Every structure is written in C-alpha cells, then in structure tokens.
Image (cartoon, coloured by chain):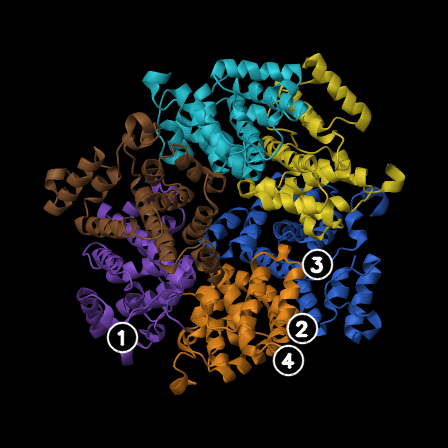
Chain colours: A yellow, B cyan, C brown, D purple, E orange, F blue
Amino acid sequence: MRISRFPVPPLESLPEDVRARIREVEEKAGFVPNVFRSLAHRPAEFRAFFAYHDALMQREGGLTKGEKEMIVVATSALNDCLYCVVAHGAILRVYEKKPLIADQVAVNYREADLTPRQRAMLDFAVKVATRSAEIDDRDFEVLRTHGFSEQDIWDIGAIAAFFAMSNRLASMMAMQPNEEFYLMGRVPKRRD
Amino acid sequence: MRISRFPVPPLESLPEDVRARIREVEEKAGFVPNVFRSLAHRPAEFRAFFAYHDALMQREGGLTKGEKEMIVVATSALNDCLYCVVAHGAILRVYEKKPLIADQVAVNYREADLTPRQRAMLDFAVKVATRSAEIDDRDFEVLRTHGFSEQDIWDIGAIAAFFAMSNRLASMMAMQPNEEFYLMGRVPKRRD
Amino acid sequence: MRISRFPVPPLESLPEDVRARIREVEEKAGFVPNVFRSLAHRPAEFRAFFAYHDALMQREGGLTKGEKEMIVVATSALNDCLYCVVAHGAILRVYEKKPLIADQVAVNYREADLTPRQRAMLDFAVKVATRSAEIDDRDFEVLRTHGFSEQDIWDIGAIAAFFAMSNRLASMMAMQPNEEFYLMGRVPKRRD
Amino acid sequence: MRISRFPVPPLESLPEDVRARIREVEEKAGFVPNVFRSLAHRPAEFRAFFAYHDALMQREGGLTKGEKEMIVVATSALNDCLYCVVAHGAILRVYEKKPLIADQVAVNYREADLTPRQRAMLDFAVKVATRSAEIDDRDFEVLRTHGFSEQDIWDIGAIAAFFAMSNRLASMMAMQPNEEFYLMGRVPKRRD
Amino acid sequence: MRISRFPVPPLESLPEDVRARIREVEEKAGFVPNVFRSLAHRPAEFRAFFAYHDALMQREGGLTKGEKEMIVVATSALNDCLYCVVAHGAILRVYEKKPLIADQVAVNYREADLTPRQRAMLDFAVKVATRSAEIDDRDFEVLRTHGFSEQDIWDIGAIAAFFAMSNRLASMMAMQPNEEFYLMGRVPKRRD
Amino acid sequence: MRISRFPVPPLESLPEDVRARIREVEEKAGFVPNVFRSLAHRPAEFRAFFAYHDALMQREGGLTKGEKEMIVVATSALNDCLYCVVAHGAILRVYEKKPLIADQVAVNYREADLTPRQRAMLDFAVKVATRSAEIDDRDFEVLRTHGFSEQDIWDIGAIAAFFAMSNRLASMMAMQPNEEFYLMGRVPKRRD
C-alpha cells in the first residue's frame, strides 16, 4: 500500500537539515517512521511540526514520557487515526514496559490498567480533543486534586491539541504506519 | 476579563526573538493580538506555532489569503472558538474587502456569498475538521473538478488541521480576542 | 443575493394590516427587516408569527430586553441560522450597549462577558433548544437558585422554543439578513 | 399526574375569547385537550399559538389533513415529545382511517405504510426538524419530482417548524396527553 | 406489506421442534407473532434466539415481567425498531394492566408514570443500549440505592443487550408487527 | 485486575455441559477465554449465547471465517469493547494469517488492507451496528453488486447484531481479555 496520498520525495532530494533529522531518527529507531517521509514534501511545515512535537513531548515536567504517549493514543483513537494509534501505541508500550497498555488505552481507556491520576489526565485530554468549547474552571479543579500543576495541565491539553492536528493530517494523507510499529514492545524480554 | 487562564508574562521577560516577533506584529497591526501574549509563556512552542502558521498562511499557491481565512473562520466556528472566529473573521474581512463575509462564514458557510469553488473548499475543510477518518478518494476528485491542485488540497486540509490545534489551545486558555478585532474591516472606507 | 427561496410579494399587494405593520417597523428601524418581507406571502401566518413574537419579546417581566435577545442569539447560533444571529445580534448590541456581546454569545456563550445568572439562563435556553426531552425538575431548581420566578422560566423556555421555529423557517427560506444589521450597534457613540 | 409544570388556571378565570375557543374544541372533541388548558395561563401567547396552528393546519392546499398530521407525528417523535406524539397520533388515525399508521410513523416512518411521495415529504420535514441549516436547493428538487408545489413545500417545512416550537413547549411543561387520545381512532368501526 | 426482506418458509417445511414452538405460541397468543415466522429460515439461530429470550424474560428474580418489558420498549424505541416497540408495547400493557404505559415509555420514558426505582432501571438500560463503553461503578451504586441486587442489575443489562441484537435483526429484515399487537391491552375490560 | 464485575464461579461448581464446553475450548486454545468463565454464572444464558455464536460463526456460507471476524472487530471497535476487539482481533490475525489486519480494522477499517468486497461488507455491518433503523433496499443492492447472496447478507447483519449484544454484555461486566490474546497471531512464523 502507498504510505501517503501525497508526494513522498526521495531522501536525497530533501534539504540537508530535513535529511539530517531523518537520519537521526533512523539511527535511533532502526527504520524511518513514515510520518517523516510523508511530511518531507513541505520542508517548512516539516521543521515546524517536529519542532513543536519535540517541544511538547521532550519537555521535562510532571508527566512521564509514557503518560504523554497515553494522551496521544487515547485521543488519536477517538479520531480513528490509524498511523497515530499504531505508531504511538508502540512507543507507549516501550516507555511503559507494559505490552498490553496500548491496546487497552486505544480501545477504551476507561477499562485500561491506569492510576486514578492517569484516568483524570485522559478525561481532560479527551475533552480537549472532542469538546474543547465546553472546558471550564471545574475541569482544572479536578486535575489539581490529582496533583497536576498548571504547567502539567498545559502539557496535557497542548499534547491533545497537537495530535488533533496530527491525526487530521494523517487521515488526509491516509498515512500508513510502518510494519515495525505493530509488534514493537509487545514481547518485552526478547526484543527490547 | 483575563485574556488567558494561563500565565501571560510581561514582554520584557521574554526571549529576544519572541519579543522581536511580537514587536513586528504590533507595528503592523497597531496592537498585539492576544494569541502572541498568551503563547509566549512557552517560548519553544511559541516559535514552532508561528513558524507553522506562517508556513501555511503565507505560502504562495492556489488559494488566496482571503480563502485561507475562510477556512480558518468556518472550521473555528464549528469548534465554537471565540478567539479564532473573531480574530480571523477580522482578517478575512480585511483581505476580502467584504464587511459581511466573516459573519456569514462563521454562522453558516452554506449560505455565505461564495463561489462554488470556495464552497467545495470549505466542505473539504469542514470534513477534515470534524470527520477526518472518513476522508476518501472521492473527496479529492470533487476538489479536482473545481480546479484545485494536489498542493492546494494539502493547503486546505493542513490549514483546517492547524486550526483544529489552535482552536483547542484557545478554548483551553479561554483566550479572549482583543477588542480591536471585533470592528476591524467592518467599515471599509474609513478604516482600511 | 435573493433574500428568500420563496415569493417576496411587493408591499402594495399586501393586506392593509400587514402593510401597516411593515411601515411601522420601517419607521422605527429605518429599513424593513427581511423577515417582514419574507413572511408576508402568507398573511395569516405573518400575523400569528409577529403576534407571538411581540407577546414574548415585549412582555414585562423578570428578563430585560437584552437578556431576551441573548437567548435568541445563543440558541440561533446552535442552529446555524444566519438571519437570526445577525439580526438579533444587532438588537442585542443595541439593547445592551455592549458592542462585543453579540459575537461572544454567538460563538460560545460560555466565554461571554455575562453574569452567573445570565449564564444559567442560557444553559436552560440551550437545553430547551437542543435536548428538550431531557428537561427535568432539577433544571428548574437551578434557575430558582439564581432568582428566576416561574414566569421568568416560562419566558426563557418559550423564547427558545419560538426561535426554534423561527430558525427553521429562516433556514428553509435561506433568508438573508439586511446589510444594516451587520454593523448596527458596533460603533455605539457615532451611530446609536 | 399533573398535566403541566406551570399554572393551569380554572376556565372561569380566563378571558372570554380564550374560554370560547376552549368550549368550541370541547364540543367538537368531547373533551378539552390539555394543550388548551396548559397554554391558557398566557392568553396573548395562547391566541397567537392557535392562530398560527390553524393557519397552517386548516389551510387548503396540496397536502391532506392526514399528511399534515404525519409531519407532526414524525417530527415530534424525533423530539421525544409525549403530548404531541400521542395527541397528533390520534388525529392522524382519525383522518387517515388507518389504525396502525400513527405508531408506524412515530417509531420509524421509513417502515410505515406510506406512498413514495409521503416518504419524500417526511424526509424533508425531518431535515427541517433536525438539520435545517443543511437544507439546500437539491432538497427542493427532490420534492418537485414528487409533485409538490412551492406552496406545498412551505407547508411541509412550516408545519415541521411550528412543531419544533410546540414540542419544546410541551417538554418544558412536561405536558401530559389526555387519556382519550391514546385509544382514539384505534377501533375504527365502533368509535369513529 | 411483506413481513420480512428475507425468506419466510411455510410452516410445514420447518423442523419439528421449530414447528412445535410456533404452535405453542400460537395457542397461547391466538396468532403467530411475525418474529417466529421471520427467524425460522435459520433453525439453529431460531433455537438459540428463543432459548436466550426465555432464559432472560422468564427467569424468576427481582424484576417483574412488566418491568422487563419496560426495558424492551424503552431501548427498542431508541433504536427506532418498529416490531419491538409495537409487539413488546402490547405485552407491556397486558402485564402491567395499564393501557397508557407502553406509549409513554416508547416516546419518552422520563415522562412516563413510573416509580423512581423503575426510572433508575431504565436509565441504566438506556446506558447499556446507547453508551455501554461508559458504564462505570457509579452506575452500579445508583442501582443498589434503589434496591437492585447484583443479579437484578445483570437482568437489566442483559435484557437491554439482547434487544440491542433483536432490534438490529428486526430492522435488517424490515420485520412488520402483526396487526393484533397494535390494539392488544388497550381496552382492558372487554378484550383481555 | 478482576476479569468481571459479576461473579465468576469456580469451574467445578458448574453444570457438566458447561464444564465440557469450557474444557473443549481450553484444549483447542490452550487457555480458557474469559468470556466462558464470565458468562458461566448464568448457565441457561451461557448455553444460548454459545449456541447462537456457533450457529453464526461456524456456519458454512459465502463469508470466510476471517471475514466474519473482520465484522466482529470493526463493529466492536465502534462500541469501544475492549474484550471483543482484543480477543477477536487475535482470532482475525490467526484466520487471515496477516499480523497487521486486526489493528487496521479496529482503528479505521476504511484504511485497512481489504478488498472492495470486504469494504462493502464492513460498511453494511457498521450500519447494522450503528444506524440499523436507516437500512433500506439500496443497501442490499450495493451488497449484491459485490456478489453477496441473500444468505450472505443475513450472515453479515446477524453477526453485527449478535456482537451488538456481546459488546454490551462485555462492557457491563468490564470483562478483561486474557493476556494471551494480545500477542496471538502477531508473530506468524514462530507461533502459528
């Protein structure tokens, strides 16, 4: 299957900084995730997309890397985004070292093996993803009772917002996940 | 009213490049749109957000600047996003030099004074905004019959996707539009 | 653009009482709002419509004229009714002498500059407009805690119900607002 | 059970014209339908409501009286309005002399024993009731292919719109149907 | 009208046990409900369907037979299932000896003449029917405060689930209710 | 985590035929799927459930076993049913010998690697699952153009209907999938 409805330029045709970024992720992951190849036909947008992604996902704060990926998987599942659920499901399994967690969060996060704090985090992320106009001060109070700071709340909502964009781009492209993602993190001992 | 639920740092506390960007928009517009002040508490995200925004909105292509703003207003209205409807409604009026167009597109773009090509553009943008998982090849065929190129289609969808993010950030912040936006472009002779 | 999909008879062809009513509103407003011209092709319905409208909107009671218009704007926006949002938005600005209020209430009344009492009023009006079968006694209790009498509650719900009808008629006609409404009440000092 | 959440004044306390109207319906039907008693606490609205109702429902045109009641039952069922479904279901059975038709139209008009023309009529009425902002010229073309005139289309839409109001008033009141309505028209030979 | 879109085999062609079951219901009811004739073209599924139905509906427990039928009618109405609303509405009237109850529950169970316990039962049944993924422990607590045991809760949910299946089969078949059901239980003295 | 909110009786306490069925599946699968243990507290319902399941899923006809599981996975995903998506996703992978197919169908069957015939099959199954009251003769015509017989169409719809029930039971129980299902069929060479 085609990985995108839009042009996927050959790597050698890309600007040097874009190629460098792609080589970097390839060395780390062992393959080039299709989102890098699919967005590369628009270098300026590519740079902004990954700068934004990294600012949110690599920032140190009150959320663990696994918790950030829970937000991505739960909200992407509501948008039926194949690429984001499969790719970030893989990353979630790797970070959390729990081979079952991604499928649970993707199908119904209410029945996943989560702490009450993580459940509250996902309730807010889902509200940002699906009913953002109804957010009110009580939502913030609930999060504070679970120990989230103002900056943590920003992170939850901003990640949900960023993937609201990302899901729509992926669906517009019909972007396919790399095969590697489907199995990654499912057999913890032997593979990771 | 507060312009955001989150911190709004004083300008002098911001990194130099962020301040420069804010001074630049202030000189052009005559005031600082609140989105600049509201996002500034996270400089890395601020930089990525506006880099992304400019890459999409200032790119030369098959869509006019006014048409891009129609996409912003139509999709932001579906998300009930006060800031984006009011601020981009103002910009739409200015670009199109039509004082009625923004309210028409915001309330019901199906009844707005648009060309059939613009109507098809908004139908696709709205599908990206609200039902992106259902996008299929027939949607692309419809756009092509209206003369949109593959790159134009990307622009339509990517702008809708970017403001899916932007709307959610604005609602999370309860970001208020500057008063200036409400009247801008409504009295074309005297003000523009 | 045509002001209606249905016939718009010349004024001189109308029954005397219908013409008198139209002359009266023209003298007061300075122009004939299109709803008068669009409904006139059915004189019996015209008479009943405006009798009903006046009974609700001009009745003395616990709601101010501005508050009644807030109900019209908030519920008409949910129905994406171009005529009602633009025309009653204008009237709302004039009554409240607040040039920003109509756009706020139309886009997202939850973020508008309202009192808690007005917010509760609109929550109930919106429930009548969109989920009337779920109204229960607790909704009445909430309104009473904000000081609304039984007759006030009737007014809130009956106005929301009347515009549920009005919005549907306007959308069926594709009724266009007069240009005058778009700017009315936006520049309070010079124009009102 | 109470017939309304709001005051139901004794007949003798009502203005003479309101009482006359109620006596008239009582003589015709053999009992006073609760909608007359429930709306009487607001005489001006009572007069406008029934003037509007009669203008639409008693007007001569391309729709039979039974077809008009089909519109009422189908759209009131979508609004879960107990009074309107039960009372107008009874009237529908009486006019059509078909004891099964009202339940069919109320539960799922798509499976009711109707002509294709009646099915098209209800499809439009339901669109007016539930998605009026999406009405477009193609809806009118479909109705014209079934032989509906412009005035017939107005009747279909205006009846759906009027009961959009009526359903909301009834649900706000929790108005109960008279017991008589439940059985009326179900045993054609002996009762009608 | 055809009673099903699918084959309805003659009784004499059916396996002996299926015919016996049909004869049994005919003797009891005085006619063969169409669901028996419509499912008979698949004998193995016929047997399992009625075995399941009887296990749920004839089991002794904390719910009366009438209450079980309330669940069927309320949830089938939400699915717009003509056969189930009409046929089980009849059975509900017969069990409860209340000629009005079925129409009330079908149109809007919130306004029906029910006990608070029955209302809570239907709230849960409706959640199982329409939003089962959101069921949580608080739903169980509410039911327990109304005196429902764990086994009663199972019955409520399992009946709602069984008719989620049954409604879908009936709508796929466009299965028509027998005429007898429409009037059954409406004139208690003379007919039952 | 508990496998069900309801009682899970020890195997030795169960009726002999129920135990025999459970032993049979355990021998075949290597473990006892939780649905067998969770439904066993109601033996009569257990027997009917699995008799129905087997009648549908093991019947010879125009659908392959893999295609039947696609229906289960696609419709269960729409109901956010954790047990059914995970357990039947595993079975789908095993039957189709395609390790990626289950995740594709669960997240967005429109982007899965399917034939146009399978896509049409799932479109109908999804309509049965989510909008059964709107099924009409045109849906049957579309399926016939893809070569489905009347009996195949029954199978598609009846499987979607059966899992409408099954999903609701599973969510009411908060039934957890066995860990074995999550990995089954993902590493075809070594395990199958």
Task: Assess whether mark 3 and mark 1 are in contact (beta carbons under 8 angstroms).
Answer: no
Q: Which residue is mark 4?
A: E60
- On what subunit does the disc labeled 3 rest? F
Q: Looking at this view, is F115 or D185 the one in front? A: D185
Amino acid type of disc 1?
Answer: Phe
Amino acid type of disc 4?
Answer: Glu
In this rendering, the label closer to the viewer, 4 or 1: 1
> Which residue sits at x=29%, y=76%?
D188
Q: Do the residues at pointers 4 and 1 share their chain?
A: no
Q: Secondary structure at mark 3?
A: loop
Q: CA distance from mark 3 to mark 2?
A: 18 Å
Q: Which residue is mark 2?
A: E149
- The quarter holding residue A23 reads top right
- The quarter holding residue D116 reads bottom left
Q: Is residue B130 visible?
A: yes
Q: Which residue is mark 1?
A: D31
Amino acid type of disc 3?
Answer: Ala
Q: Which mark is residue B49?
A: none
